Amino acid sequence: MIYRENGQFKTTYGADQQIFPIAQDRYLVLAIIAFAFIGVPMLADEYFFRAILIPFLILSLAALGVNLLVGYCGQITLGAGAFMAIGAYAAYNFLIRVDGMPLLFALILGGLTAAAMGILFGIPSLRVRGLYLAVATLAAQFFWDWAFLRVKWFTNDSPSGSVSVSTLDFFGWVVDSPTEKYLFCLGMLVVFALLAKNLTRASIGRQWMAIRDMDVAAEVIGIRPMWAKLSAFAVSSFFVGVAGAMWGFVHLGSWEPAAFSVDRSFQLLFMVIIGGLGSIAGSFFGAAFIVILPIFLNQLLPALGGLVGVTISTTAVSHAELIIFGSLIVFFLIVEPHGLARLWATSKEKLRLWPFPH
Amino acid sequence: MKIRSLALAASLAAIGMTSAVTSTAAFAQAKEQFFPVLVYRTGAYAANGNPWANGYLDYLKLVNAQGGVNGVKLSFEECEFGYATDRGVECYERLKGKGATVFQPLSTGVTFALTDKAPADKIPLITAGYGLSASQDGSVFTWNYPLLGTYWVAADVAIQHVAKQAGGFDKLKGKKIAHVYHDSPFGKEPIPMLQELSKKHGFELLLLPVAHPGVEQKATWLQIRQARPDNVLLWGWGVMNSTAIKEAQATGYPREKMLGVWWAGAEPDVKDVAAGAKGYQALAMQHSAEPDAKVVKDVLAQLHAKGQGTGPKEEVGQVLYMRGLISSMLGVEGVRKAQERFGKGKVMTGEQVRWGLENLNLDQKTLDAMGFAGVMRPIQTSCTDHMGASYTRVHTWDGSKWVPGTEWYQADDKLLRGMVLSASRKHAEEKKITPRTPEQCKL
């Protein structure tokens, strides 16, 4: 009823090709963005910002990057954590070694370094594919884990191997309160999400998808697999690298290589699988599912226990959290193997017909 | 099916949302001093995290049973983070919102992450026996309290003990000492001190990292078998320790030549191997296993006898249980000291507790009266020294229990001071912190 596009006529190519052709979608997304920028800072408290929203935003950005590579180009990667680490350590080194380096440039340079490394570690994708490629990208993970633990230059000779960043100065705007950090992350995410969406709609994104669907056929119609695959690795690593730099700079403040361990790589891959491969919105759903759900469960169970007058021990809660979280993953993958994004798309489809489904 | 699952997901999310909102909104009551308890009762380090957490909680309960701190009752809440740094930070944020005034993370990774957040939030961090060694310098690290010891103290004392066994520092020359460490900031922290000592005394230092969580050590022990070091320092935590001792047994490395840091010297580390670990030594940060201490008897009589204790009764008095209990005591004493200045019977803020910790002075008489006779030696902190004491013993596993050594070691203050100062100055420069002057310290 509400969700119907009757009467929305497209008279120009521009109108036909916009990101959200249906007006309701457009307004909804604009409303969500406006709410995120204006409403959330007024409503959320510090805990929400620092423990939930900021990690969610940064990991959404990383998931977005992984989705470009895995979801759009079909190249499975298990090295996303390493590219986050490269972004973080490169940005850190640019920031402390170059005098007067602005924060934004350091982040971008961190991303570019990650992109360069992404191309390097993407080269095996020209020869191996599928699960074999996933194993090959694991090499990146282990190599960089090792490098950041062992090569003292990367960590500026810090005795414990942990590095930290002091003030975040964004062109004179000192990002230090949780609200400012949130707005900074949100701003970055909006820009990058728009970039990602447009990339996937443009020729380069179509090349990626052609490679994903059938690389031999894509080659036959004139797409260069090397260019398409390596550009996917570069762009994806750039996104992931910037996210890694933000994870270190904005969220953690000081970090050690364990913050970007192989667990992080798995986490990011699961985000895009659960959220929806080849879907921008899916990256957000996946990040929300993986980041927020465990924390909610962790707080929900004692609260539920409190309602019925039972005190649940911390151990029981955290075991239950893992059990429920695991079963939910299985549940969603059985119900909708194409991810939460497809679930969202089908519900929109149903909404269009409602209340008269045929 | 899809609609149903969607509805289910939506309702679940809604419940989660409301519960999270209500739980963060529920602040601690006005008349109670809130103690956050960051624990890891699950995960790779649970075996060691559990007794620590139980001891920590039991002491808070004991204080409550005895009437609180000048009448102020203590409230507490656990938050499980499974030794994961990001979940630890989440726990910190969650419990901070409930009025926390002092944090003890029991994880070097989380300590590093919180060191930057604590000054902004005005909450002191107690890292009894771990954390950043340079944070002993309170003029730069205003909010960090590595009470009772740091890894640099541990490294120095470990070498002192090795030298003593060898018959003097001059005997160290030409010896090989292997440092088998958990490959994380925890294990790397003592390396600068060990290198300094190796230069000074002329022994050769072998650095052998072990990847987290430490169950795979075959390669490390192969290296030990080849290099045949005279001594092995074991800098592990959790499952890494028992694995190392098993590997030592398998490769035939004498357990008497192994010396663990104080995080590698508790019951969970050796009880699997039991007799096989006989002769294994570890540093004891002041206390060892203390089943006969008065405070332990108090806990048993006033809590466990009434069914209010935390965890199994057998654990009370074990090494890590005592570590938790003493950590908890230090926090409580910080609050008590703060009350002396800012008003007895009042709930202290984070800043006031910080003052209390900085002016902590527990002499032997006070400690004995509190039931810590034979367990602890005096501790006195100041603005420039946030550690307070560096007394360390060495205890030995006799196959069934830890036997404390009789000799008390102390870190070489001159060496330690120099290293701490140069590291803290470097930190201050990087972070653009101006060290506090003696006048500012009095505030």
Image: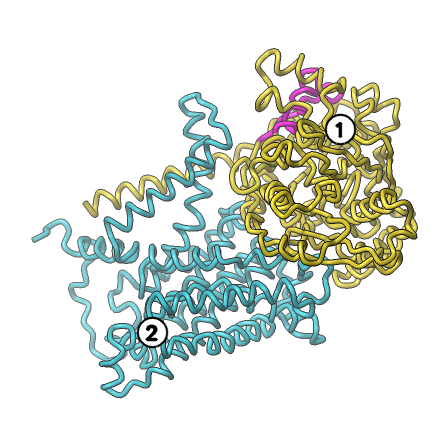
Secondary structure at badge 2 equals helix
Count residues near mark 2 (Cα–Cα under 10 Å), then give few for <14, some for 14-19, many for 20+. Answer: many
Tell me the chain of label 1.
B
Marks 2 and 1 sit apart, C-alpha to C-alpha, by: 67 Å
Of badges 2 and 1, nearer the viewer stands 1
Secondary structure at badge 1 equals strand
Q: Is residue A184 left or right of residue A69?
A: right
* The image quarter in which residue B285 lies: top right
Q: Is residue B1 left or right of residue A180?
A: left
Determine the colour of chain A: cyan
Q: Give the residue displayed 62% in from the left and 24% down from the top.
A: B315
Residue designated by label 2:
A200
Which label is found at residue B403? 1
Q: Give the residue displayed 47% in from the left and 54% down from the top.
A: A56
Which three-letter amino acid code belongs to the residue tagged 1?
Val
Residue B283 at what x, y percent from top left? 76, 39
- Res. B33 visible in picture: no
- The answer to the question of whether label 2 and label 1 lie on touching residues, with beta carbons closer than 8 A, is no
Q: Give the residue displayed 42% in from the left and 38% down from the top.
A: A321
Residue A118 at what x, y percent from top left? 47, 74
Give the extent of the magenta segment: B54-77
Residue lying farthest to the left in this orientation: A358
| Residue B70 vs residue B389, the one in the foreground | B389
Residue lying farthest to the bottom in this orientation: A222
Quarter occupied by the C terminus of chain B: top right
Q: Give the residue displayed 67% in from the left and 39% down from the top.
A: B103
Residue B41 at what x, y percent from top left? 54, 35
When the figure is inspected, residue B369 is found, relative to residue B320, above or below; the finding is above
Count residues near mark 1 (Cα–Cα under 10 Å), then give few for <14, some for 14-19, many for 20+. Answer: some
Residue B109 at what x, y percent from top left? 63, 50
Chain displayed in yellow = B
Residue lying farthest to the front in this orientation: B252
